[in-house]
Image (spheres, rainbow, N blue to C red):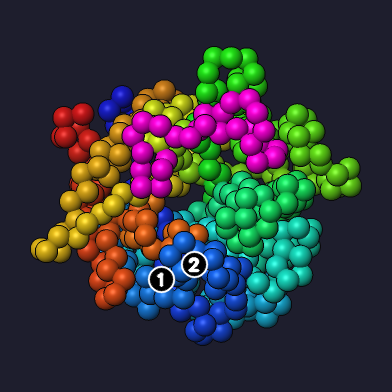
């Protein structure tokens, strides 16, 4: 039984990264092109004109990075496999050098007592599959399942936790409605097919992992679920908030856990009758072992037409991060309780939680990021409150281990616990890294040592 001031004894304390954001080495050892290689090299797409060609050079510096995790008392690490590094064409012949890299990474983690949490898809679709239709095309879901089986055969005897997809909502809405992420399309008519094929890919991959690994594998999916509320107490704004929650959250959660899409969202998205075939919903609802939650902020909605089909989203107010996001830690507690109440997953992990601030490196090569420490403390206290309320939360992964390539924002936002000096690739732990290490080493006890 967990007390009000404790975390479970086996709680996972870690950080999270994504392959394209840290690895670099985009043209080495047989890696194929991904949609983010193409997108970042397209003029005007990245705010600072940068690319992920080098990023944090993790491909060459991974041993150093794993040693850093050990010094910072992490017992878990969430990372993604670059699909195009192990299958350059997205299908067909595997790339042995790519598989060797991830095998060495996993072995290095285990040798250091760090549990690997593998994400199979963090937005970097092989470009050859995009050229053939990408997530608009149903066949991509089948290719993803084949890729999942390949990864399981190579790593499944050492990896205990598998995450199929990271944030399919972001893939669909940012990649196909707003055009802010790869592949950079702006067509609301693509939301339904892209999101359905992503969910189908998750279901097929879950089945493939089960077929390869049996009950040994813990399989889940990661969704971004932020706290949504009406901008006012008017009924029309309450309806707008319900619609936004439906579009962003229930459109994914309901079929995963209930085997059906919400009807009002099907209407809003004008879902083609032929899109959802017999058996699809059963595949999508294949049981999983855990739910991964990425939580960052609150959104307030009001009546009116935003970017169709979305209602108007009111600009954030209050305490804001460098990304312009509102700091709203109580939302994490509320969202965790909502997920458990409405969907009852067996286990939940906070697979991303973090913040970007304008970190400054001092002359003594230190970063004093008290704002980030306060942010993490408040969110961990919210997570602990959810545990006390009965939420089966089993881990917390800070985004991110180190500053990295932040997608369309380039290298300006710094989310890391560790400062990356991009000119030298030197890693410099910030004050928050040392603080989080003490929290992890004491299984959350240091939160109370801070007088909270």
256 to 68, vertically: above or below: above
* Residue with the most extreme bottom position: 29
Q: Is residue 300 magenta?
A: yes
The residue most toward the right is 274
Q: Are marks 2 and 1 in contact (CB under 8 Å)?
A: yes
10 Å neighbourhood of mark 1: few (<14), some, or many (≥20)? many
As displayed, is residue 102 above or below residue 70? Answer: below
Give the answer, above or below, for where 322 lies relative to 405. above
Query: Is the C terminus in the top left, top right, bottom left or bottom right quadrant?
Result: top left
Mark 1, secondary structure of its residue: loop
Q: Residue at x 27, y 44 (%)?
A: 372
Q: Where is residue 367, by image quadrant?
A: bottom left
Relative to 277, is 78 on the left or the right? left
412 or 346: nearer the eye? 412
Percent x, y of residue 141: 73, 59
Q: Quadrant of residue 387?
A: top left
Mark 2–mark 1 Cα distance, whole angstroms, equals: 8 Å
Label 2: which secondary element: helix
Disc ID at residue 55: 1
Neighbour class for label 2 at 10 Å: few (<14), some, many (≥20)? many
Residue 64 at x, y = what percent?
29, 72
- The residue to which callout 2 is attached is 20
Left or right of 77? Residue 163 is right
Residue drawn at (58%, 68%), measured in percent from left and top?
Answer: 39
Residue numbers of the magenta segment: 299-325
- The front one of 266 and 151 is 266
Farthest left residue? 364
- Residue 371: where, in percent of width, then height? 25, 42
């Amino acid at each position: 039984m967990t007390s009000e001031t404790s975390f479970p004894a086996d709680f996972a304390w870690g950080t999270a990264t994504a392959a394209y954001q840290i690895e670099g080495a985009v043209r080495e050892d047989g890696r194929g092109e991904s949609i983010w290689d193409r997108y970042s090299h397209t003029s005007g797409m990245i705010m600072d004109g940068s690319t992920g060609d080098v990023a944090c050079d993790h491909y060459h510096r991974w041993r150093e990075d794993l040693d850093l995790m050990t010094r910072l008392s992490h017992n878990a690490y969430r990372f993604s496999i670059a699909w195009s590094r192990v299958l350059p064409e997205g299908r067909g012949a595997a790339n042995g050098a790519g598989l060797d890299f991830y095998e060495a990474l996993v072995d290095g983690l285990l040798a250091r007592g760090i549990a690997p949490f593998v994400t199979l898809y963090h937005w970097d679709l092989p470009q050859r599959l995009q050229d053939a239709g990408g997530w608009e095309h149903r066949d991509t879901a089948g290719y993803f399942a084949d890729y999942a089986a390949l990864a399981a055969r190579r790593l499944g005897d050492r990896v205990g936790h598998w995450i199929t997809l990271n944030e399919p909502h972001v893939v669909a809405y940012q990649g196909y409605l707003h055009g802010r992420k790869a592949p950079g399309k702006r067509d609301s008519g693509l939301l339904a097919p892209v999101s359905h094929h992503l969910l189908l890919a998750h279901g097929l991959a879950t089945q493939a992992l089960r077929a390869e690994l049996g009950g040994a594998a813990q399989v889940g999916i990661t969704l971004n679920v932020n706290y949504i509320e009406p901008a006012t107490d008017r009924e029309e704004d309450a309806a707008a908030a319900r619609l936004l929650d439906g579009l962003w959250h229930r459109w994914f959660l309901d079929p995963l856990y209930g085997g059906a899409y919400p009807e009002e969202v099907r209407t809003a998205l004008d879902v083609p009758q032929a899109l959802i075939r017999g058996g699809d919903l059963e595949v999508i609802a294949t049981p999983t072992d855990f739910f991964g939650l990425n939580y960052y902020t609150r959104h307030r909605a009001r009546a009116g037409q935003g970017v169709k089909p979305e209602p108007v989203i009111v600009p954030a107010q209050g305490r804001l991060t460098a990304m312009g996001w509102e700091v709203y830690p109580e939302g994490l507690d509320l969202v965790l309780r909502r997920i458990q109440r409405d969907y009852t997953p067996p286990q939940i992990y906070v697979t991303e939680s973090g913040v970007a601030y304008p970190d400054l490196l001092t002359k003594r090569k230190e970063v004093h990021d008290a704002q980030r420490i306060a942010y993490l403390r408040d969110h961990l206290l919210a997570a602990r409150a959810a545990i006390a309320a009965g939420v089966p939360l089993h881990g917390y992964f800070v985004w991110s281990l180190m500053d990295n390539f932040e997608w369309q924002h380039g290298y300006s936002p710094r989310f890391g616990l560790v400062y990356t000096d991009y000119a030298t690739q030197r890693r410099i732990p910030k004050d928050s890294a040392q603080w989080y290490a003490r929290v992890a080493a004491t299984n959350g006890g240091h939160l109370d040592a801070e007088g909270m």
